Image (tube, rainbow, N blue to C red):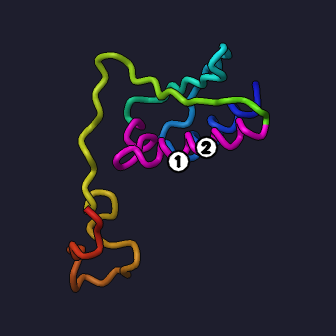
Amino acid sequence: MEKDQEFVEFIIKALVDNPADVRTERAVDEMGVLITLHINPADMGQVIGRMGQTAKAVRTLLRVVGAKHKARVNLKIDEPEGSHRGPRREYNDRNNGQRSDEGSSSEDSTPDMDDFKL
């Protein structure tokens, strides 16, 4: 396995809930290297991130790794046909109604909207 492929697997396995389902395929052609990422459909939102920012960051890091080896490296996230992304988790679902900087105080378990960038 090449360094760029190992790098993608390492990063993605650290992000997802189902790291055993992460696998990559590496193809080389005249355009450069294409790494195709296959993940559990339930982890799709974590890998893509809000407005694609996580995927964009991984692609940027991968291009840096490719530049070190004088290769053009691209990442394709494979979404199986017919798959659907699960419902978005709300803030209260992820943190059991508390902000991460709050203690177990029950004064105000509703987060302020000013704390979010919508």
117, above or below 37, in the image: below
Answer whether residue 64 is magenta in the image.
Answer: yes
Residue beneath the point at 35% across and 49% down: 50
Q: Secondary structure at mark 1?
A: helix
Mark 2 neighbour class, 10 Å CA radius: few under 14, some 14 to 19, many 20 or more: few
Three-letter amino acid code of the residue under disc 1: Ala
Q: Position of residue 28 (x, y in %)?
A: 68, 16
**Which residue is disc 1 drawn over?**
57
Quadrant of the image occupied by residue 73:
top right
Q: Is residue 101 above or below residue 118?
A: below
Overall secondary structure of the magenta section: helix
Per the image, the residue denoted by label 2 is 11
Q: If you read the primary sequence from the N terminus, does the residue marked by circle 1 or circle 2 appear first? A: 2
Viewer-proximal residue, 56 or 88? 56
Quadrant assignment for the N terminus: top right
Pinpoint residue 75: horizontal percent, then vertical percent.
55, 30
- Which range is magenta? 43-68
Front residue (pair 107, 24): 24
10 Å crowding of disc 1: few (<14), some (14-19), many (20+): few
Q: Position of residue 44 (x, y in %)?
A: 40, 36
Q: Is residue 85 above or below residue 118?
A: above
Q: Disc 2 marks which amino acid?
A: Ile
Taking the spot 68% from the left edge, 43% from the top edge, the residue there is: 64
Q: CA distance from mark 1 to mark 2?
A: 11 Å
Q: Quadrant of residue 72 in the image?
A: top right
